[in-house]
Image: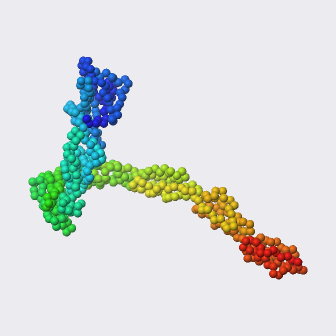
């Protein structure tokens, strides 16, 4: 049996009205059947506690059921019933159509699965294109298969129409094979047929039919290498003969064998076939019909949705586009089809919105956050951190931000260079020098600090000053008794000499000239005045 996706009833005298079920009772005291089970979307449902449990006099129950059907075709609802025969429930039996009044109930046969259509094929049912890769069709359903557009680029091998018969398709799936323009004009390929309409209009129907409006000029170009030979056009219409021959234009005459239909009439309808010298063929089914669609169905009353209307005749198109900052939700181009209906409803315009930014970084701050088209997201980091990435992102026309969300990273200054013969006086966080960190330097004994004694880590990740250095120095040695030293300074640089001058009546050794050495010591003691 085919699967019933949703049974809309409860077998209960309490619930039958709310679930639109009809229960038929028999006269007399028959043995009846056990309470029937109820499944909803494949799951068993338990009746209410106060539901009737005696079905000894129930002979038939009718209910609405929804059968398997592709989403594009809408719900497939049927009126079904089960009958109590010999103490057993028999069924379900369902009418062919939900709106049938007094229709005949028939056994519910298995549905057919359709998975992954062959390459380059388009599947339709009831003039609606099926886009799902996997679909289920009920018994007796008919599907059409054709090669994808542009029409004539591929040739269909096999039956274009399949019918579901109790779980089995009536024929094997057809396939689409490439034609000459796709195979570099090899002789073992069927010819490509290109369609050109200099005047008038036409529509490619879901079934693969080329529906043409009357008084249209139609050119069918059979693509074949003229060097190999001449193809041949044939047609099923007996209305008139058609002009055929190689195209005249210099860039077309070597590969386009053309059939022209001028100012089409309904009598021109038929199948037009091009055959190569080897007998390989490709065909276009042309139907000429005076069909117009209701122009009111594509009139838009939305200030953000704009349209350009070619007309409302068969094959004419209405082009839609949205105002800046909005995007289409639906089909941009709607065509008037042979059914007298537009190929789709007018689309809607939705504002372009970028996704809301929720930073993962707890330090990252959103200073501005406008998710509409052209809006900006502006970021900042707290003191002591720098932004890694773009400081601002723009919401683009495709609904995405112009770049990745930035992050905050702590600003660190590099470890300072410790001067030779020097040391760090204060280093609270060794190796981690954030903004505002202060480092002080000092020198060893007999050395003098040259430069800044303390430096600060700034917001640009650099120290406020270069590290100082320690220069050797000789301390003031003191003046000798009864004399003095020249020059007189607080400290002396390596290479400085001291000269001692004595007071009147005192002398010192003339050769004694103490020298400040590179290790900060004097080469000899200061001489005495005697």
Residue at x-position 18% and y-position 54%? 284
Residue 335 visible in rendering? no
**In this rendering, would 192 be left or right of 502?**
left
Residue at x-position 64% and y-position 61%? 456
Residue at x-position 32% and y-position 29%? 37
Outermost residue, right direction? Answer: 505
Position above or below: 213 against 229: above
Location of the N terminus (image quadrant) = top left
Location of the C terminus (image quadrant) = bottom right
Number of marks drawn: 0
Position above or below: 219 against 168: below
Q: Position of residue 390 (x, y in %)?
A: 49, 59
Q: Position of residue 497 (x, y in %)?
A: 77, 77
**In this rendering, would 367 be left or right of 263?**
right
Outermost residue, bottom direction? Answer: 510
Position above or below: 401 against 109: below
Quadrant position of residue 443: bottom right
Quadrant position of residue 498: bottom right
Q: Position of residue 11 (x, y in %)?
A: 31, 27
Q: Nearer the viewer, residue 506 or 222?
A: 506
The way the protein has been coloured in the rendering is rainbow
Q: Position of residue 358 (x, y in %)?
A: 49, 50
Outermost residue, top direction? Answer: 28
Residue at x-position 63% and y-position 67%? 466
Position above or below: 199 against 10: below
**In this rendering, would 146 be left or right of 439?**
left
Residue 136 visible in rendering? yes
């Amino acid at each position: 049996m085919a699967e019933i996706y949703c049974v809309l009833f409860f077998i209960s005298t309490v619930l039958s009205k709310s679930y639109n079920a009809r229960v038929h009772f028999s006269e007399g005291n028959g043995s009846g059947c056990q309470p029937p089970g109820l499944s909803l979307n494949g799951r068993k449902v338990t009746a209410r506690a106060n539901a009737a449990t005696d079905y000894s006099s129930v002979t038939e129950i009718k209910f609405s059921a929804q059968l398997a059907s592709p989403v594009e075709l809408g719900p497939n609802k049927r009126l079904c019933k089960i009958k109590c025969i010999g103490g057993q429930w028999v069924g379900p039996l369902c009418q062919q159509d939900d709106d049938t009044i007094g229709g005949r109930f028939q056994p519910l046969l298995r549905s057919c699965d359709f998975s992954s259509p062959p390459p380059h094929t388009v599947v339709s049912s009831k003039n609606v294109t099926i886009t799902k890769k996997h679909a289920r069709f009920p018994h007796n359903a008919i599907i059409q298969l054709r090669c994808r557009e542009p029409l004539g680029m591929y040739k269909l091998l096999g039956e274009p129409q399949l019918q579901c018969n109790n779980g089995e398709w009536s024929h094997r799936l057809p396939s689409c094979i490439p034609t000459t323009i796709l195979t570099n004009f090899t002789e073992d390929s069927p010819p490509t047929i290109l369609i050109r309409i200099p005047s008038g209009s036409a529509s490619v129907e879901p079934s693969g039919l080329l529906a043409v409006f009357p008084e249209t000029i139609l050119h069918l170009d059979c693509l074949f290498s003229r060097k190999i030979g001449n193809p041949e056009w044939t047609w099923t219409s007996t209305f008139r003969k058609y002009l055929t021959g190689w195209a005249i234009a210099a860039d077309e005459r070597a590969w386009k064998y053309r059939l022209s239909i001028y100012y089409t009439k309904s009598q021109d309808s038929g199948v037009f076939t091009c055959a190569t010298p080897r007998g390989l063929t490709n065909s276009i089914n042309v139907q000429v019909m005076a069909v117009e669609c209701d122009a009111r169905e594509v009139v838009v009353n939305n200030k953000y949705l704009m349209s350009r209307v070619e007309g409302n005749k068969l094959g004419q198109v209405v082009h839609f586009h949205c105002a800046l900052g909005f995007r289409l939700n639906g089909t941009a181009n709607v065509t008037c089809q042979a059914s007298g209906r537009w190929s789709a409803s007018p689309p809607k315009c939705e504002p372009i919105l970028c996704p809301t930014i929720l930073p993962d970084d707890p330090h990252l701050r959103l200073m501005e956050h406008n998710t509409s088209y052209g809006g900006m997201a502006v970021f900042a980091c707290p003191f002591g951190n720098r932004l890694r990435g773009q400081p601002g992102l723009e919401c683009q026309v495709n609904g995405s931000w112009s770049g990745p969300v930035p992050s905050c990273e702590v600003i660190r200054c590099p470890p300072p260079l410790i001067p030779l013969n020097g040391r760090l006086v204060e280093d609270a966080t060794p190796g981690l020098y954030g903004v505002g960190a202060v480092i002080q330097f000092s020198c060893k004994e007999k050395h003098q600090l040259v430069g800044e004694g303390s430096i600060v880590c700034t917001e640009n990740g650099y120290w406020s000053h270069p590290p100082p250095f320690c220069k050797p120095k000789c301390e003031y040695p003191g003046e000798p008794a009864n004399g003095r030293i020249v020059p007189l300074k607080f400290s002396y640089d390596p290479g400085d000499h001291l000269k001692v001058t004595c007071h009147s009546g005192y002398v010192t050794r003339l050769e004694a000239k103490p020298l400040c050495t590179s290790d900060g010591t004097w080469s000899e003691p200061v001489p005495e005045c005697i």
